[in-house]
Amino acid sequence: MPSSTFTNLKPEKRQRIFQALLTEFSQYPLSQSQVARIVKQADIARGSFYKYFTNLLDAYQYVLQQSIFQLHTKLAQKLTVDNQDTIANFYHYTVEFAHQLKTSQYKDFYRLFWQENQYYLQSHAAIEMTNFKFFQHLTLKVANQAIKNPRQNQVIIQLLRQVSHEAIKEILSGKDEEQVLQNLKIILKVISAGLQQEEG
């Protein structure tokens, strides 16, 4: 994550560097990203980059966390507060997130994240993939009935996150959004029906 030297910069300079990072990571996968292009756009010395960030992975993690804070946090909070039916809420969460991405500055950043960079990050021990764990402590509810088995709750939450992320990935890859969301709805209905039957 950024050093205190970076966080103590004037807001205008921090924003200029952030925009240079976002541009780089939105146009090039991590495996092809270059500090040279970033410092040129940000108008800073190469040495300054390494005063602010340990390396490119560190800088990427910073942009990823900023994007999560801006795009995911409010939606995730809504999901945890209004949790009468977790399955339905995951669907609405995915729809709303896809809608926000259409006009977001992070659209291309996320497209590359889902297509390539998530795998690159997972293969590098220097980066711990802890950013999408909003729901790890969420108690799963179906038709306002809590799932009593903690292990089952954890596994289903993980499955819901995966199908939601896959839907976003497909939309960003250019697949028909309406069809992707319809397919997601079918998958979630099957999960919901299975859970209700088991709990019943």
Image (spheres, grey):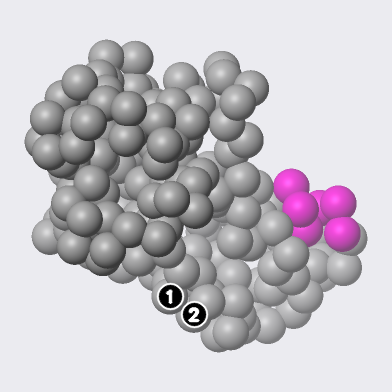
- How many residues crowd around disc 2 within 10 Å: few (fewer than 14), some, or many (20 or more)? few
Residue 78 marker? 2
State the predominant SS element of the stretch in magenta: helix
Magenta span includes 94: no
Q: Give the range drawn in magenta.
A: 150-155
Give the image location of residue 180, x and y in percent: 29, 46
Left or right: residue 188 versus residue 95 is right
- Mark 2 and mark 1: span between their CA atoms? 6 Å
Residue placed at 49% from the left, 80% from the top?
A: 78
Residue 186 percent across, percent down from the top left: 43, 52
The residue under label 1 is 74
Nearer to me, 24 or 188? 24
Q: Is residue 93 above or below residue 14?
A: below
Question: Is disc 1 placed on a helix, strand or loop?
Answer: helix
Question: Is residue 178 something one can see in this rendering?
Answer: no
Q: Where is residue 96 in the image (x, y as percent from the top left)?
A: 31, 67
Residue 70 seen from this side: yes
Locate residue 146, reporting x and y percent: 77, 75
Q: Quadrant of the C terminus?
A: bottom right
> Do the CB atoms of the residues marked 2 and 1 lie less than 8 Å apart?
yes
Query: Depth-wise, is mark 2 or mark 1 nearer the camera?
Result: 1
The amino acid type of the residue labelled 1 equals Lys
Question: Would residue 81 be found to the left or right of residue 73 on screen?
Answer: right
With respect to residue 96, does 162 lie above or below? Answer: above
Residue, x 12% and y 38% (percent of image)?
Answer: 43
**Camera-side residue: 10 or 139?**
10
Disc 1: CA contacts within 10 A as few (<14), some (14-19) or many (>=20) = few
Residue 102 sits in quarter:
bottom left
Report the residue at 60% width, 77% height from top. Answer: 80
